[in-house]
Amino acid sequence: MKTIRKNEYIFLCYFIMSSMFWGITSYVLLQTSYRDSWLSIIISLVLGIIPLILFYLTLNLSPCDNIVSLINKHFGKFGIVINIILMLVVIIMATLLLWNLITFISYQYLFKTPNAAIAILFMSVIAYIVSKDLSVISRCGGIMFFMVIILFLITFFTLLGKINLSEIKPLLENGFKPVLKGSYLYISNNIFPLYLLLIIPKNNIVDNSNLKKPLFIIILMTIIMAFIVIFCCITVFGAKMAALYQFLEYHILKTINIADFFQRIESILSIQLIFSLIMGSVLYLYYLKTSFKQIFKINKKDNLIIILFSIIITILSLKVFRNSISFELFILNIYPFISIILFIIPLIIFIKAKVHPKL
């Protein structure tokens, strides 16, 4: 049995929740809620309590089973269909994340390099990490987590003096409906993906008896960090300017200088974005590999499965979205209805488990 430590599992929770925030949720929030985007995140914390509790209850439902075996157990002969649908959802999510990573690297660092070369480079790194043991993936996540937190704190404290609270006024300029829509966008992009960690059974987590407290602490911390990012971007840039940038987090890093000596350090500080995007992609690919093996009862050939999904995701990320406009329209109008599947399936499993507890 492949096991990971409790703190490593907690770090993975951070990455799977934060990976779609950078350049995706942050951008569409400002397009939807404008200067009230920070308020959308606060409301999503309240509305997100139900899916978060459901995640914890599903994790404890059958500690020896992961989400694939739970689906097979509670959906019977339709289990394979449900699992394949879930895999298709994850492929879409992985495609979005890789496209986002390619776009960020292309625009900010390698603007003369073909997108295909960037995709192959990063997908090779992601596939290599997934080809290793789960404990290796979790250790990579642990190292990256501490680096992300350090860089985040440096960024936050250097931006404090630039905050202008007048930029958040007037509140509810466009009414409450855009704020609610923004809240759901945050939940669909950043809370629902947490269910994919159900691919790791609770029994595979060492010292899992006291998991509730650290789990909810890291979830709360992740949401607070998202709030800080949006709040700083609006109060430093102003909502009008912040809404212009897809990667507004990167552009706000350009304003940072430390003691008037260290300037133009955005390339270093933006590592936190890259690490989150990479680890999110790693977890999606790990889910696809594990799910595919269980569904089709394949005991070996891990590398072939990883290569297969890596090729599929790479091709889709290069072909499906021709520009940022088509990407934005998909995220705003289509993806929220796709991602809710991640919530509905565990909800049905939990209800069936309570109605038929002997299953």
Image (spheres, rainbow, N blue to C red):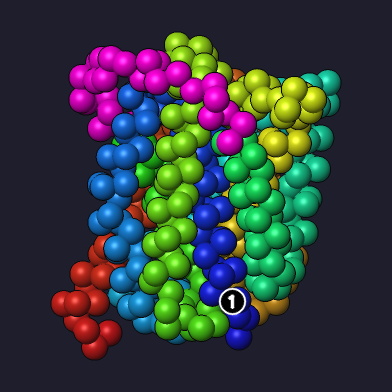
Q: Which residues are magenta?
A: 157-182
Is 351 in front, or is 320? 351
**Residue 188's image quarter?**
top left
**Residue 82's image quarter?**
bottom left
Query: With 72 as the anchor, is 102 left or right in this view?
Result: right
Query: With 103 as the anchor, is 345 left or right in this view?
Result: left
Is 104 drawn above or below residue 293 in the view shown?
A: above
Q: Position of residue 148 (x, y in %)?
A: 64, 48
Q: Categorize mark 1 by other alpha carbons within 10 Å: few (<14), some (14-19), many (20+).
A: some
Q: Position of residue 154 (x, y in %)?
A: 64, 39
Please tell me which residue is depicted at 70% across the width and 77% down the height of the picture: 300
Please tell me which residue is depicted at 47% across the width and 49% down the height of the picture: 222
**Residue 174 covered by magenta stretch:** yes
Which amino acid does the dot numbered 1 rest on?
A: Arg
- Residue 253 visible in the current orientation: yes
What residue is pinned by disc 1? 5
Is 125 drawn above or below residue 70 in the view shown?
A: above
**Residue 198 covered by magenta stretch:** no
Is 65 in front, or is 156? 156
Q: Main secondary structure of the magenta part?
A: helix
Q: Position of residue 162 (x, y in %)?
A: 54, 21
